Amino acid sequence: MLRVSTVRKWLAYLMVFYFFFYPQMLTAVSGKFLYVFLGAAILFALLCFMSGNRQKRIDIYQFEWLIILAISSLRNVGLQHRDYLWPLTFIALILTLLVLGQDDGWCDKLLRTACLFSTVYIIACFVFYMIPSIYSSMISFWGYIPNGTELGRFGYRAGLADNHSANGTYCVVPFLIGTSVLLSGTIQKKERKKWYLLVGLSAVAVFLTTKRAHLVFGLAATLITYYIFSPKRMNRKLFRLLAIMVTALVILQFVQNIPYFSEILGGFSDQGIDISNGRFEYWLYAISIFMANPLLGIGWLGFRYNSSILIRGTNTGGIGYVDAHNVYVQLLCENGILGAVFVIAVFLHFIISTIRFFLKEKEKLTLIQTRVLAASFALQFFCLIYGVTGNFLYDRTCFIYVFGCALFCAVKKSIVE
């Protein structure tokens, strides 16, 4: 008889594979093929949920995500426009979180599998950097020139991904996981060199993608992960220096999205460009929509279907819409003050609970559980600060966040029960 734990592992592998390679499947086969993957994921999740929860109550963490599922489904503008792919993906992600959070047998294997798939993107990034002429094969594959490559001249920025932002997302994953493994002190000495190499290559690859937010926020996540989860403490003066440097980089990343600072920083590069990529305009537009619909907003995914006035040139990446490049502003726009406050409260509840649980139970945790919690925190924290300038709740980065939340729930469930 097929065991629930086995189906749960299948679900974990299926979703991590989908995260890394769905653009290639979409291009090579068709969008309909993605629905097969998502349908299988939802089926696996429902099978696990029904089989494994007959005698169990729904806990507060599951309840919160069920509420988010209701909010995102009942007033979903994407569904109203018959655009089903992302709404169905989001449903699959929430069900995956609920199911994976029941057991921690999949956790360490998923982290290693994610690093393995990320390595494919990292290697491709270096190959296209060293042999730029072969990037033409990727342009032929996609049928267009991916964003961020400057008309294909810098193909390594996008690598195997469909744009350079996606490549930055894929390449930063092993940086977050690898630093968590190393800083938590839970890996055997003979494995450390392998993890140091992976972290180093990942950092360089993210740098090559030119996605400064991924690099800066990745460094910030690493620093906070060290402070909470490392069993060793570096010299206080050195830590304070590093904290000041990283904080300055994070502040710079935030303020450069404000017009006045954007113009100044753009001037330093002798280009006189808006290095915020128009984000401030997006934010103001989202806030104006919120002001007209302050209580309940315009509905989940509503911003992208009201973004036509913001579309210029190739800033949509060929998908025909833009998101607000700020998760919190977009939540206000789409869900009003009531929905936004609830969803943000869930974000805070999860990451604070991760910290509190580790500090309370760290003496009981195995080495694997400790590094899983460290990775959970790093993935969550990265997404939450990235959400100030990015769309982690509305694009593939959501997978990273959901995996982070599921890792915490799984370890907590294994200890508490």
Image (tube, grey):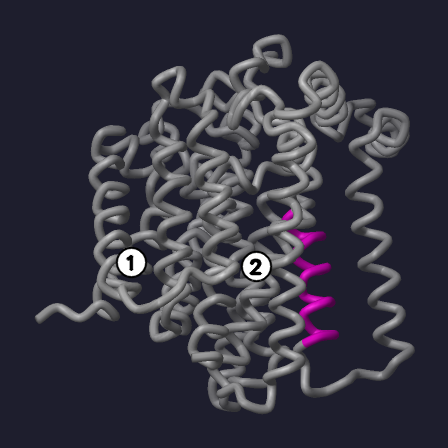
Residue 223 colored magenta? yes
Magenta stretch, main secondary structure class = helix
| Along the viewing direction, whichever of 86 and 112 lies nearer the viewer | 86
- Residue at the spot x=63%, y=38% of the render? 390
Report the magenta residues as a range: 214-228
The answer to whether 30 appears left or right of 256 in the picture is left
Indicate the amino acid at tag 2: Leu
Residue 379's disc is 2
| Along the viewing direction, whichever of 275 and 48 lies nearer the viewer | 48
Q: Which residue is mark 1?
A: 49
Indicate the amino acid at tag 1: Phe
> Residue 413 at x, y = what percent?
44, 73
Decide: few, some or many residues near mark 2? Use Cα within 10 Å; few <14, some 14-19, many ≥20.
Answer: many
**Is residue 30 placed above or below 368 in the rendered structure?**
above
Q: CA distance from mark 2 to mark 1?
A: 24 Å
Quadrant for the C terminus in the image: bottom left
- Residue at the spot x=56%, y=67% of the render? 199
